[in-house]
């Protein structure tokens, strides 16, 4: 059977990538229903070679929708997810609106696919898609935690401007071409710069982006005791987010065994050959669906501790691909 799939936020960078990925993966779509705000009404989304005209969301348009992929920000999700779910759709929501709601599963299919279904085996009505910087980190941490028990993670991110959507990408292009705006999209000039400030600061001195990495990781990994210490930084690149991790384990590890464990884990491609200058980079992960891992090495000072470098396309595995992979897990269960 084929499914009626709505995309809310269909004209944004993530929304358009969702349509591309549904098409690339041959997801069985009988009808695509692109939705966006009044500002984008009438814009077209091309799917399987056909143009689909964007409509504004309403209760009516969700009638008969099987799967609704949302990526239009938290307030649109708060307004429309309950409506779409009441009309019978399963909502896969890429915003932060429901991620920490104890009744809503927060899912990365390689890590906790079992959370997608209730105790009767039925899909939950609203499923949250995690933040991009969380997704790529948990794909890497899951096999390591299962085998060696993680005690603490120190992570620094190098995040693409596309994390802030089209506006974030345009800001970099404008600044590089010499247009300096009255108000910077990335708080400060991002061209030729690195800004250790993503989303707003909280009272504890961390940013909201950093606390997403803490709280979402604990929820997805099902371990509230995990200690994660992040610093998130915006850098002037496209293509993907990079993350440098220092991971301390309870157990000893053999580095060759650990490397094979990562190599054989789902969703991961190990690119780690310093002799031939091979390691993951944003440009080489661009438009790929996997999480790339390299620079795998034991901490020089602490033997139970590992350093590694992780890169993934933030619009794909960090957002759209993860959402479509969730939808794929629901096939045959709707
Ligand atoms: C960024 N990680 O790079 C953010 C974008 O909670 O889904 C995604 C925000 C989110 O700015």
Image (cartoon, rainbow, N blue to C red):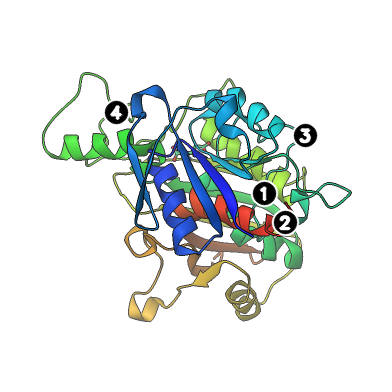
Tell me the distance, in whole angstroms, between the alpha carbons under discs 1 and 4. 33 Å
Between 22 and 325, the one nearer to me in the picture: 22
Viewed as shown, does residue 324 lie left or right of 107? left
Q: Nearer the viewer, mark 3 or mark 4?
A: 3
- Residue 20's quadrant in the figure? bottom left
- In the displayed structure, 77 sits above or below 327; it is above
SS at mark 3 in the image: loop
Q: Residue at x 35, y 24 (%)?
A: 39
Q: Identify the residue under disc 1.
A: 107
Q: Residue 11 got which mark?
A: none
- Residue 328's quadrant in the figure? bottom right
Q: Identify the residue under disc 2.
A: 113
Find out whether the residues at labels 1 and 4 contact each other: C-beta distance under 8 Å.
Answer: no
Q: Identify the residue under disc 3.
A: 102
Tell me the distance, in whole angstroms, between the alpha carbons under discs 3 and 1. 13 Å
Q: Earlier in the sequence, mark 1 or mark 2?
A: 1
């Amino acid at each position: 059977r084929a499914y009626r799939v709505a995309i809310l936020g269909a004209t944004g960078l993530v929304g358009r990538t969702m349509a591309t990925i549904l098409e690339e993966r041959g997801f069985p779509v009988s009808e695509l229903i692109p939705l966006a705000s009044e500002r984008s009404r009438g814009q077209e989304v091309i799917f399987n070679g056909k143009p689909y005209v964007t409509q504004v969301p309403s209760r009516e348009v969700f009638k008969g929708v099987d799967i609704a992929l949302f990526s239009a920000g938290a307030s649109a999700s708060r307004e429309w997810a309950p409506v779409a779910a009441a009309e019978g759709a399963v909502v896969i929501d890429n915003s932060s609106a429901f991620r920490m709601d104890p009744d809503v599963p927060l899912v990365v299919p390689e890590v906790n696919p079992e959370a997608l279904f209730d105790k009767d085996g039925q899909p939950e009505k609203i499923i949250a898609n995690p933040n991009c910087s969380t997704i790529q980190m948990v794909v890497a941490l899951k096999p390591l935690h299962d085998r060696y028990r993680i005690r603490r993670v120190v992570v620094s991110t190098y995040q693409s401007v596309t994390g802030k959507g089209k506006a974030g990408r345009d800001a970099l292009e404008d600044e590089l071409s010499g247009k300096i705006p009255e108000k910077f999209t990335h708080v400060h000039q991002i061209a030729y710069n690195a800004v250790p400030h993503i989303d707003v600061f909280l009272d504890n001195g961390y940013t909201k982006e950093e606390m997403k990495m803490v709280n979402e990781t604990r929820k997805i990994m099902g371990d509230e005791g995990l200690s994660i210490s992040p610093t998130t930084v915006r850098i002037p690149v496209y293509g993907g987010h990079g993350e440098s991790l220092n991971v301390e384990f309870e157990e000893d590890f053999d580095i060759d065994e650990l490397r094979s464990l990562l190599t054989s884990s789902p969703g991961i491609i190990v690119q780690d050959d310093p002799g031939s200058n091979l390691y993951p980079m944003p440009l080489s992960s661009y438009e790929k669906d996997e999480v790339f891992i390299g620079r795998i090495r034991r901490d020089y000072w602490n033997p139970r501790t590992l350093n590694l470098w992780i890169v993934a396309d933030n619009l794909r595995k960090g957002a759209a691909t993860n959402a479509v992979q969730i939808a794929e897990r629901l096939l045959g269960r709707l």
